[in-house]
Amino acid sequence: MNGNTSPLSLLLDINFDSTSDFDCFANAMSGREICNWRVNKNIDRSSVKYAVVWKPDLGLLASLPNLEVIFSAGAGVDHIFEDTKLPKNIPIVRFVDPDLRDRMSEWVVLQCLMHLRQQRSYDRNQRQHSWQELAQPIASEVRVGVMGLGELGKDAALKLKMMGFRVSGWSRSKKNIKNIPTFAGDNDFNEFLCQSDIIVNLLPLTNKTTGILGRDLIEKLPQNGAIKPVIINAGRGGSQIEADIIKALQKGILGGVSLDVFEQEPLSESSALWDIENAILTPHVAAVSSMPALASYVAQRIEIFEANGSLTNLVDTKSGY
Ligand code: NDP
Ligand code: OXD
């Protein structure tokens, strides 16, 4: 804190769908000078005290000499660490919000039910005007393992449990969640995998989680469950090895996947994933940040920071999330 009470500027380096998105910030920040970097790059960089970013321009953050706090416009922060010139020692606050959490859980529950109820097969049958009943396990026969029990993973696990699935979870540190068995760390990983028919990935992308959804993991999933193994990924595409997933789907080792995130986004038109019937693909929309919610979140955090210097939902730069 520099003791200066005059509102210094907030820089926004995020995608806005419309001017009303930008207006959310203008309204929430009452009186503070705001600049939309993607529209106007002709700014006094020394006046910027806060930055709200999504995939910021490389080197931009390092070029702001009086920057005090970086806010991620999303829950994930890997997009910030991609900046090799990222200034050290500037706190990074990530977006934690009930709206984002609920949207993610909606998507996760939908995907688990789509695979449980074989919706893709019924869609195909409908196109073929074919009236055919398929064998149908109930949710309580299907084991769902949620990777990542943070803000999003824990809520998704609880909602899947409410739907009747047999849910367990895995995280870095041990968690205690009522009625949900939990596993922690590398030592528990194999035990967790071999009792998961559906894997839901809600891990952040870090050095440790890059490529985790690949052949090694797939081969550990049980082949004797009520349904063939399914992978659902709404964490980050960098955590999946698409070539391994495609092979496993083609060989029938995986029964299906739901992917919201990809190694390269947008997904290449030539990817084999597009044409695999039981691969459900969505374009990184599982939980999109709501602009009014993000704007008021940032405004509140700045107000508290300026009142007493404290920040919540801080990223641990060592572990990368
Ligand atoms: P959190 O930081 O709250 O939770 C992360 C969880 O992952 C924690 O439980 C953490 O363990 C666990 N974890 C991290 N590293 C490891 C590891 N090496 N081994 C085991 N567990 C690990 O993040 P959120 O829940 O808020 O968000 C999760 C991710 O979801 C984001 O990082 C982002 O990538 C993705 N996301 C995707 C969206 C989409 O639309 N597709 C939208 C929003 C987010 P511990 O609790 O012990 O720290
Ligand atoms: C996020 C995202 O991290 O939208 O919030 O992916």
Image (cartoon, helix red, strand yellow):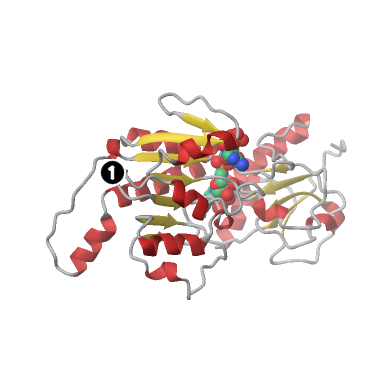
Number of numbered tags placed on the structure image: 1
Residue 269 seen in the current view = yes
Residue that lies at the very extreme toward the left in this rendered image: 131
- In the rendered image, which quarter is residue 305 located in? top right
- Identity of the residue drawn at 67% across and 49% down: 207
Residue 288 seen in the current view = no
Q: Amino acid at mark 1?
A: Ala
The front one of 97 and 106 is 106
- Identity of the residue drawn at 43% across and 51% down: 231
Label 1 belongs to which residue?
226
- Under tag 1, what secondary structure? loop
Residue 253: percent from left, percent from top: 38, 56
Q: In what quadrant of the picture does the C terminus appear?
A: top right
Residue 147: percent from left, percent from top: 50, 41
The front one of 103 and 240 is 240
Up/down of 303 relative to 287, above or below: above
The front one of 220 and 301 is 220
- Identity of the residue drawn at 77% across and 29% down: 308
